Image: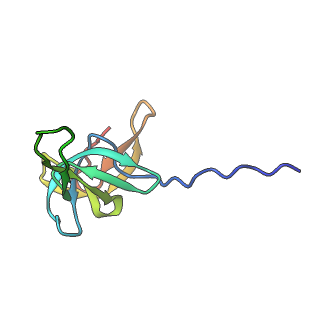
Amino acid sequence: MATKAKQPLRHKVHVKKGDTVQVIAGRDRGKVGEVLSVNPKTSQVIVQGVNIRTKHLKPQQEGESGQIVTQEGPVHSSNVMLYSEKEKVASRVAYTFTEDGRKVRMLKKTGEIID
């Protein structure tokens, strides 16, 4: 009897690349930024201007000086909420259907459709 290969565990993340979100927990609480990437395997997102990390790079060639590079680190998806630019408020997500039958994401507080 053949056994089924286990699929890697993937979590459904409520935000997508390009969404505007607000950080609701941690050192960067209150900051608003755009989602640059989503990793559903670890349930983490990278948000523009949030969780900035500093990396020191060695010089690669002779005579070249080293560099200090800053880049965004990942944040857990549970620590971000979708943000409405019009209403300036963060909200949870509701899934609803449009008149033509498409399933879309909607902000609960404002009723604004995201997709």
Q: Position of residue 64 (x, y in %)?
A: 12, 40
Q: Position of residue 20 (x, y in %)?
A: 22, 47
Query: Observer-nearest residue: 90 or 108?
Result: 90
Query: Observer-nearest residue: 71 or 48?
Result: 71
In which quadrant is the C terminus drawn?
A: top left
Residue farthest to the right?
A: 1
Query: In the figure, 1 relative to 17: above or below?
Result: below
Query: Observer-nearest residue: 63 or 65?
Result: 63
Q: Position of residue 47 (x, y in %)?
A: 23, 50
Q: Position of residue 55 (x, y in %)?
A: 20, 54
Residue at 25 percent of width and 57 percent of height: 91
Colouring used for the render:
rainbow
Looking at the image, residue 64 sits to the left or right of residue 2; the answer is left
Residue farthest to the bottom?
A: 26
Looking at the image, residue 39 sits to the left or right of residue 35; the answer is right
Looking at the image, residue 51 sits to the left or right of residue 38; the answer is left
Residue at 48 percent of width and 55 percent of height: 11
Query: Observer-nearest residue: 110 or 67?
Result: 67
Residue at 16 percent of width and 39 percent of height: 62
Query: In the figure, 83 relative to 98: above or below?
Result: below
Quarter of the figure with residue 73: bottom left
Number of numbered discs present?
0
Residue farthest to the top?
A: 100
